[in-house]
Every structure is written in structure tokens, then in C-alpha cells.
Amino acid sequence: MELVLALRALKGLKEQRPGIFYRRSRAFLHFHEDVAGIFADVRAANSSDFDRFDVTDPAHWPDFMAEVAKRL
């Protein structure tokens, strides 16, 4: 998936396993797939909670990548 390739290029993220990214020593981003589509859970700023983003449609990827970059 092109989105994963873009995430791999970001400084500050390390892919521990395919599609599971860490920032420093904490889980930061991972993906889920279900009948509704593909979703990415990204750690909320200054929190242990995750926010879910629908990344099924490539048209949403630029906004998603901008949000990820803000949280790094």
C-alpha cells in the first residue's frame, strides 16, 4: 500500500512489524481492516489513547499524513 510506503519515509517512525509503527519506544500507529474499510489508529497527542482515521479512500491520505506529521 502506498500509504505505508509514505509512513516508512517519515523521520521519527520505526516500523516494528509490517504496518505497526512506533515513535521512540511507544506504539504510535497501526492499521485495522474490516467490512467498512481500512482504518489507522494513531496515538493522540500527549495521551495513551488512539484516534481512528478512515484511510480506505486515497483522497483522504494527504490529510491523514498531515495529521500524523503534526503528532510526531
Image: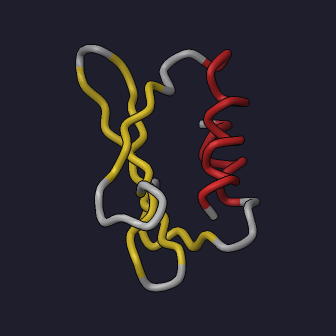
Q: Position of residue 63 (x, y in %)?
A: 68, 30
**In which image quadrant can residue 39 be found?**
top left
Direction left: furthest residue: 35
Residue at the location (30% across, 65% down)?
Answer: 48
Q: Position of residue 33 (x, y in %)?
A: 31, 31
Quadrant holding the C terminus:
bottom right
Position of 1 relative to 69 (above/below): above
Q: Nearer the viewer, residue 56 or 71?
A: 71
Is 37 on the left-hand or right-hand side of 10? Answer: left
Position of 6 relative to 59 (above/below): below
Is 31 on the left-hand or right-hand side of 1? Answer: left
Residue at the location (67% across, 73% down)?
Answer: 12
Q: Position of residue 8 (x, y in %)?
A: 67, 59
Residue at the location (50% across, 27% down)?
Answer: 55
Direction bottom: furthest residue: 25
**In which image quadrant can residue 53 be found?**
top left
Q: Position of residue 61 (x, y in %)?
A: 65, 29
